Image (spheres, rainbow, N blue to C red):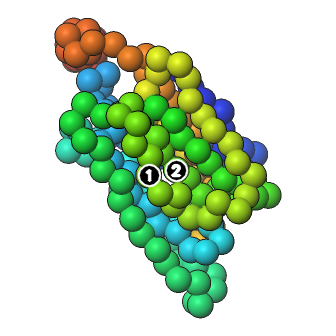
């Protein structure tokens, strides 16, 4: 497991509002199968990762300060055996304003939000996205994100790792 950088406002890390691995009791065999995002023309408001164990991050939609801001929403669903291996982020003044996902099958999502900010990419060779943690507050939206990555291994190795984790957790 490898943790990526913290993006957005990292000053208040102790006020983390979500950690999908802990909150959703994810095991090593669970994987992200989709992402749903909501945004206005100036910032990402909400993000929800959907996992293979039929659990997903559950965030309420933040209300925009400006009622004239239009709220957009879109979902990026992965195909069978496809995983996210690169995440592009767009930031301005420590605010995450846009995201894009790339996969092991060579697909890429649209840019969710704006691509007008400072462009950053997170990926690690031979790793795929595992889960996210961060902070999402009303009315600010997504304040901070950090991605965790897992080394790509065979399905047989994932099943064995999942059984070991289950035994450790429940013994």
Residue 164 showing in the rendered view = no
Q: Residue at x 25, y 41 (%)?
A: 79
Q: Residue at x 42, y 69 (%)?
A: 73
Considering depth in this image, is 142 or 24 the residue closer to the camera? Answer: 142
Q: Residue at x 43, y 27 (%)?
A: 128
Q: Quadrant of the C terminus?
A: top left
| Residue 66 drawn above or below residue 32 | below
| Residue 102 drawn above or below residue 157 | below
| Residue behind mark 2 | 100
CA separation in Å, label 2 and label 1: 6 Å
| Percent x, y of residue 74 | 39, 65
| Residue behind mark 1 | 109
Q: Are marks 2 and 1 in contact (CB under 8 Å)?
A: yes
| Left or right for 10, reference 171 | right
> Is the residue marked by circle 1 packed among few (<14), some (14-19), or many (20+) residues within 10 Å?
some
Name the element at disc 2. Answer: strand
Considering depth in this image, is 21 or 83 the residue closer to the camera? Answer: 83
Q: Residue at x 75, y 52 (%)?
A: 118
Residue at the far right in the pictured view: 93
């Amino acid at each position: 497991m490898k943790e990526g950088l913290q993006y957005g406002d990292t000053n208040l890390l102790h006020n983390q509002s979500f950690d999908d691995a802990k909150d959703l009791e994810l095991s090593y065999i669970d994987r992200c199968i989709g992402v749903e995002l909501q945004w206005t023309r100036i910032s990402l408001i909400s993000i929800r990762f959907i996992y293979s164990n039929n659990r997903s991050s559950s965030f309420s939609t933040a209300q925009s300060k400006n009622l004239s801001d239009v709220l957009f929403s879109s979902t990026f669903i992965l195909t069978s055996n496809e995983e996210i291996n690169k995440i592009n982020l767009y930031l301005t003044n420590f605010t995450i304003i846009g995201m894009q996902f790339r996969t092991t099958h060579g697909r890429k999502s649209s840019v969710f939000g704006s691509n007008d900010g400072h462009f950053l990419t997170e990926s690690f060779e031979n790793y795929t996205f595992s889960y996210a943690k961060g902070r999402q507050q009303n009315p600010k939206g997504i304040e901070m994100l950090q991605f965790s990555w897992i080394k790509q291994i065979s399905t047989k190795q994932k099943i064995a790792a999942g059984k070991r984790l289950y035994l450790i957790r429940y013994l």
